[in-house]
């Protein structure tokens, strides 16, 4: 039996996937409300294919509990909240989970950390937690890191099809855990040391951040001379060794906008490129603000309350608003501006910012300038409702002829 600790965006789909493939799973979370709603068959977030996966896992009798179970394999997928001020992750929930595992585990148990952590966390911080309790790592307890790589919006597909990495000190245990993950993972599973597993995860996200920053810098260059950045990227990407990502209103989420900071924090003298990329991506909400001002000026619109931001989530077709470019933009707007600007997102049904609308048509009725911050399918399917607006399309999804771009 595996005990999966933390039933959020990563822990839950992973637990369901193991259960679907016939492995006995208990999912543990200290949120009693979440545990009881999962037990009653209600999911806590939306994701393509999650409902079907849940049904398949229920058929194999997955269980949910607030209690840690006595077993020999634990997967820890608890949150590691980002502390904006220090640009570090707070590993307190990982420590708490490890401590609770130690209270109940069998001798020789494997503790696999899937939560996002910064490189060095396991050696510097997790090992001491275990050793302080008198356990010998490698005998009483085996410590592994299996960083998740799935992308929100395509999580279920990627759980099965992405390659994985397992970091361990002990090849034999690493291979056993590899077999466990191969119950559902159809792709290559690489067994490596813990430090390489930690580092490669952060490197992957940093690579993507830098690539997006390049696209964003190109967008700014093209704006100054009225060139079409999308056309230029489209053509450049026809080259067999060029693959530029897409510019946008900024980089959000809990991963790509966060992980590069660990490298900058640990290697300040060696991370010029990484830091510059972060700054470029962080500057995009301000660039969007400049574009909003351009349009207001051009059309003689003085009242900011005539501007509506479409999208509050960090990317399309998910309900996650962490570090979202729209929230970054609202933060950057001075008080006067933030006071009246309208906001709508079809995935965010509770009010989290001022002047947020829950009904799309009410939102449209109040605004003259629509700023597409997120390319949800919802807006793609409702283009006819916005053709009487001035549209600033930061995601290049708008088919309307006269829309403004980044
Ligand atoms: N974005 C752009 N232009 C692009 C692609 C993305 O501006 O061409 C923006 C998005 O709009 C969003 C942000 O970047 O604001 C991040 O979105 P994303 O879709 O690139 O990535 P995440 O954060 O949802 O997931 C990433 C993935 N990492 C990589 O692709 C290297 C995923 O595989 C990881 O599992 C995840 O981080 C994680 O948990 O670390």
Image (spheres, helix red, strand yellow):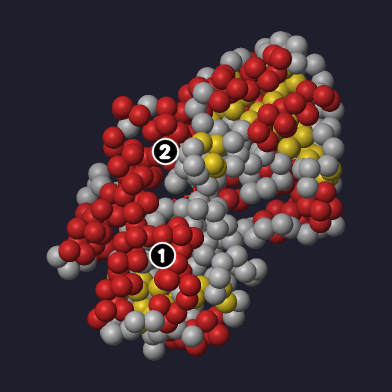
Q: Look at 68% across and 29% down and name the residue there.
A: 95
> Does 75 sit above or below residue 391?
above
Between the residue at mark 1 and the residue at mark 2, the CA separation in whole angstroms equals 28 Å
Q: Look at 39% across and 56% down and name the residue there.
A: 250
Mark 1 closeness class: few <14, some 14–19, many ≥20 residues within 10 Å: few
Q: Can you name the residue that lies furthest to the front here? A: 336
Mark 2 closeness class: few <14, some 14–19, many ≥20 residues within 10 Å: many
Q: Disc 1 on helix, strand or loop? A: loop
The image position of residue 5, as x and y in percent, is 73, 37
- Residue 4 visible here: yes
Give the residue pinned by disc 2: 260
Q: Can you name the residue that lies furthest to the left here? A: 225
- Displayed quadrant of residue 294: bottom left
Q: Look at 57% across and 19% down and name the residue there.
A: 123
The image position of residue 187, as x and y in percent, is 54, 38
Ligand 1 contact, mark 1 (Cβ < 8 Å):
no
Give the residue pinned by disc 1: 334
In-front residue for pair 175/47: 47
> Does 89 sit above or below residue 53?
above
239 left or right, relative to 117: left
Question: Mark 1 or mark 2, which has the lower sequence index?
Answer: 2
Q: Nearer the viewer, mark 1 or mark 2?
A: 1
385 left or right, relative to 391: right
The image position of residue 81, as x and y in percent, is 59, 42
Q: Disc 2 on helix, strand or loop? A: helix
- The quadrant in which the N terminus is found is top right
State yes or no: discs 1 and 2 in contact (Cβ < 8 Å). Answer: no
- The quadrant in which the C terminus is found is bottom left
> Does 265 sit above or below residue 139?
below
């Amino acid at each position: 039996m595996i005990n999966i600790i933390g039933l959020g965006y990563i822990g839950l789909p992973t637990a369901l996937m193991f259960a679907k493939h016939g492995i006995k799973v208990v999912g543990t979370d200290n949120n009693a409300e979440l545990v009881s709603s999962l037990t009653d068959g209600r999911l806590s977030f939306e994701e393509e294919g999650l409902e079907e996966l849940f049904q398949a896992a229920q058929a194999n009798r997955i269980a949910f509990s607030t209690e840690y179970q006595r077993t020999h394999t634990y997967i820890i997928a608890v949150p590691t909240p980002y502390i904006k001020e220090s640009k570090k992750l707070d590993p307190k929930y990982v420590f708490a989970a490890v401590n609770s595992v130690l209270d109940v585990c069998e001798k020789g148990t494997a503790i696999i950390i899937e939560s996002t952590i910064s490189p060095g966390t396991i050696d510097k911080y997790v090992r001491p937690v275990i050793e302080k309790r008198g356990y010998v790592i490698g005998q009483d307890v085996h410590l592994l890191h299996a960083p998740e790589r799935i992308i929100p919006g395509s999580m279920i597909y990627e759980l099965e099809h992405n390659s994985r990495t397992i970091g361990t000190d002990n090849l034999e245990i690493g291979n056993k855990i590899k077999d466990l993950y191969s119950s559902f993972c159809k792709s290559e599973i690489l067994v490596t040391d813990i430090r390489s597993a930690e580092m490669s995860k952060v490197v992957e996200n940093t690579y993507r951040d830098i690539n997006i920053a390049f696209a964003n810098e190109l967008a700014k260059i093209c704006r100054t001379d009225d060139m079409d950045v999308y056309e230029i990227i489209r053509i450049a990407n026809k080259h067999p060794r060029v693959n530029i990502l897409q510019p946008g209103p900024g980089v959000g989420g809990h991963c790509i906008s966060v992980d590069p900071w660990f490298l900058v924090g640990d290697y300040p003298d060696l991370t010029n490129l990484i830091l510059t990329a972060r700054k470029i991506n962080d500057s995009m909400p301000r660039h969007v603000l400049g574009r909003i001002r351009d349009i207001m000026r051009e059309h003689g619109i003085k009242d900011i309350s005539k501007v509506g931001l479409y999208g509050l989530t960090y990317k399309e077709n998910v309900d996650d608003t962490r570090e979202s470019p729209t929230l970054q933009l609202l933060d950057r707007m001075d008080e006067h501006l933030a006071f009246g600007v309208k906001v709508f997102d079809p995935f965010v049904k509770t009010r989290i910012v001022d002047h947020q609308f829950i009904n799309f048509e009410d939102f449209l009725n109040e605004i003259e300038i629509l700023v597409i911050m997120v390319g949800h399918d919802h807006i793609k399917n409702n283009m006819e409702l916005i053709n009487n607006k001035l549209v600033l399309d930061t995601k290049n999804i708008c088919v309307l002829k006269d829309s403004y771009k980044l």
